[in-house]
Amino acid sequence: MIIFGTKGYLYQLAILTLVCARCGNPAAHTLRKRVTKFTLFFVPLFPFSTKYTTQCTFCGAEQQVTREQTEQLQAQETGGRAYGSAGQQPYQRP
């Protein structure tokens, strides 16, 4: 019997202050990367899905962004330092 499936990882890349498209408030937005990996016998082998999103901390609205937009947002970040970094260990999504 072969056991296979998927496992999701959530990386917090940065926390940015942006104007929310939904509520219109200037609020903190978390920039996240979601990676879904194929697993075989509970061992993650390779990623098959990567998505980037921002989430407003004021109203909770989540918006999907492209990889290029993610890189631009990280470059525009003031001070050049994020609260979280790309090299940080991920926390798993339930």
Image (cartoon, helix red, strand yellow):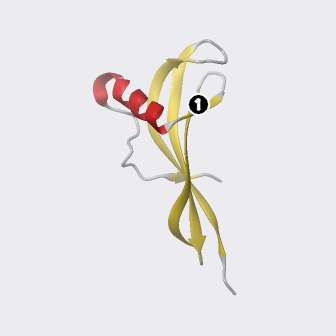
Residue at image position (34%, 28%) is 75
Element at label 1: strand
Residue type (three-letter) at the residue carrying disc 1: Gln
Left or right: 47 in relation to 89: right
Residue 73 image point, x, y percent? 42, 28
Q: Is residue 81 above or below residue 7?
A: above
Residue at image position (66%, 15%) is 23
Residue 28 image point, x, y percent? 51, 23
Q: Which of 92 and 72 is in front in this view?
A: 72
Residue linked to disc 1: 55
Residue at image position (46%, 31%) is 69
Q: Which residue lies furthest to the right in this view?
A: 1
Q: Nearer the viewer, residue 81 or 66?
A: 66
Q: In this view, does 32 lie above or below 50?
A: above
Q: In which quarter of the image is residue 48?
A: bottom right
Residue 84 image point, x, y percent? 41, 39
Q: Is residue 87 above or below residue 3?
A: above
How many circles with numbers are drawn on the protein? 1
Q: Which of 15 and 74 is in front in this view?
A: 74
Residue at image position (29%, 24%) is 79
Few, some or many residues within 10 Å of mark 1 (<14, 14–19, 20+): many
Q: In which quarter of the image is the N terminus?
A: bottom right
Q: Residue furthest bottom?
A: 1
Q: In which quarter of the image is the C terminus?
A: bottom right
Q: Nearer the viewer, residue 48 or 14?
A: 48
